[in-house]
Image (cartoon, helix red, strand yellow):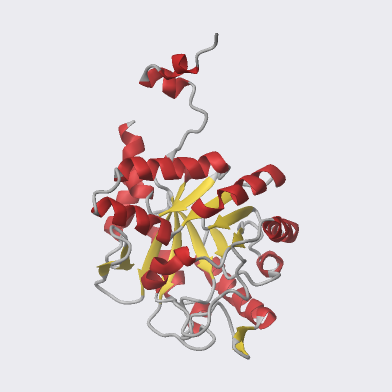
């Protein structure tokens, strides 16, 4: 008779027949950039994750390079916010400054920028507000200005996260017609109106001051809609399609993997990270094992790329072998 346990007898044979293998090359690490000086501030709800000013961020970037993490995604904490998120379109704003700084001093790093307005608006929503809701098409016009500011600064990839209808097509047209056809777009194609985003909103000072984002982010109960959303982004020119969050939506990651011929990204979001950290602090779980099991499950579900706050710790585990 066949005994499956024969192929589990030792670490060597388990590694030999392992179906899913994590690599440091799978990871994108998020960075929160403050438009101030002298800032290295730990985010209370995300232990081990910090907000940095550009004059303090080199230590963090040195560590990423040493660990073999070569891709970062940038989020802004600007000094000034207003109703339309003007600083998002400022060609001398904090993210264009950060892109130039990283590309000059760490040319080996691949830089992705978040394209959205929630970090820049005084109301915390992802665009221009009319009648207590985000105006989709007026917001697209401003997103086009933001993406060109980042492209001119030298960004390697852009990642629009606001879930405005038509975003990918609008940005693709704008990039192509301004000489930036080489810049890929990673669409937040399937982004749910999730309760798992709480710590990020602390990190980026981006919590809505009224209402919520359910009129533009997806209903967590919907599955087939995810394929429709992803299909629209692919049709409009997305190079990579993303599912966000990851853990409660592993079925969606697998659906997209089975349906589309694009790389699939998954965002292992702040709430997922914070739960592991909180349980580990209580001594209720083995943090390292839970972290690696979590990341492996995302990869096994079909993600080619994982955006995760665990990236540095996971890279250290993988380096040990």
Q: Can you say which quadrant of the picture contains the N terminus?
A: top right
Residue 185 percent coordinates (x, y): 61, 59
In this view, the residue in front, 224 or 144, is 224
Q: Say which quarter of the image contains residue 143.
A: bottom right
128, above or below 148, in the image: below
Tell me, yes or no, if residue 2 can be seen here.
yes
Residue at image point 39% right, 76% down: 205
In this view, the residue in front, 220 or 244, is 220
> Most extreme residue toward the top, as rendered?
1
Residue at image point 47% right, 33% down: 21
> Most extreme residue toward the bottom, as rendered?
131
Residue 291 percent coordinates (x, y): 37, 45
Residue at image point 53% right, 78% down: 212
Residue 73 percent coordinates (x, y): 46, 59
Residue at image point 43% right, 45% down: 294
Q: Can you say which quadrant of the picture contains the C terminus?
A: top left
> Most extreme residue toward the front, as rendered?
1
Residue 115 percent coordinates (x, y): 55, 69
Left or right, 73 with respect to 145, comes to: left
In this view, the residue in front, 120 or 57, is 120
224, above or below 305, in the image: below
């Amino acid at each position: 008779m066949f005994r499956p346990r024969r192929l589990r007898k030792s670490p060597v044979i388990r590694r030999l027949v392992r179906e899913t293998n994590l690599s440091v090359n799978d990871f994108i690490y998020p960075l929160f950039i403050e438009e101030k000086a002298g800032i290295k501030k730990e985010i209370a709800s995300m232990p081990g994750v910090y907000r940095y000013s550009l004059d303090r961020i080199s230590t963090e970037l040195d560590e990423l390079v040493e660990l073999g993490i070569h891709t970062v995604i940038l989020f802004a904490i600007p000094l000034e916010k207003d109703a339309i998120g003007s600083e998002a379109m400022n060609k001398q704003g904090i993210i264009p400054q950060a892109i130039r700084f990283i590309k000059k001093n760490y040319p080996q790093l691949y830089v992705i920028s978040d394209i959205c307005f929630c970090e820049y608006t005084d109301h915390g929503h992802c665009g221009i507000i009319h009648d207590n809701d985000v105006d989709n098409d007026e917001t697209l016009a401003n997103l086009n200005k933001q993406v060109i500011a980042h492209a001119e600064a030298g960004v390697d990839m852009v990642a629009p996260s606001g879930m405005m209808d038509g975003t990918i097509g609008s940005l693709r047209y704008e990039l192509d017609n301004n000489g930036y056809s080489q810049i890929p777009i990673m669409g937040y194609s399937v982004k749910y109106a999730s309760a798992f985003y709480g710590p990020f909103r602390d990190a980026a000072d981006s919590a809505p001051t009224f209402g919520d984002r359910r009129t533009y982010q997806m209903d967590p109960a919907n599955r087939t809609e995810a394929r429709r959303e992803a299909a629209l982004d692919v049709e409009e020119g997305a190079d990579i399609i993303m599912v966000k969050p990851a853990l409660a939506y592993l079925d969606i990651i697998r659906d997209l993997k089975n349906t589309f011929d694009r790389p699939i990204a998954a965002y292992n979001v702040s709430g997922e990270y914070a739960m592991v950290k909180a349980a580990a602090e209580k001594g209720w779980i083995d943090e390292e094992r839970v972290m690696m099991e979590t990341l492996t499950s995302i990869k096994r579900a079909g993600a080619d790329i994982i955006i995760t706050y665990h990236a540095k710790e996971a890279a250290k585990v993988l380096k040990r072998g």
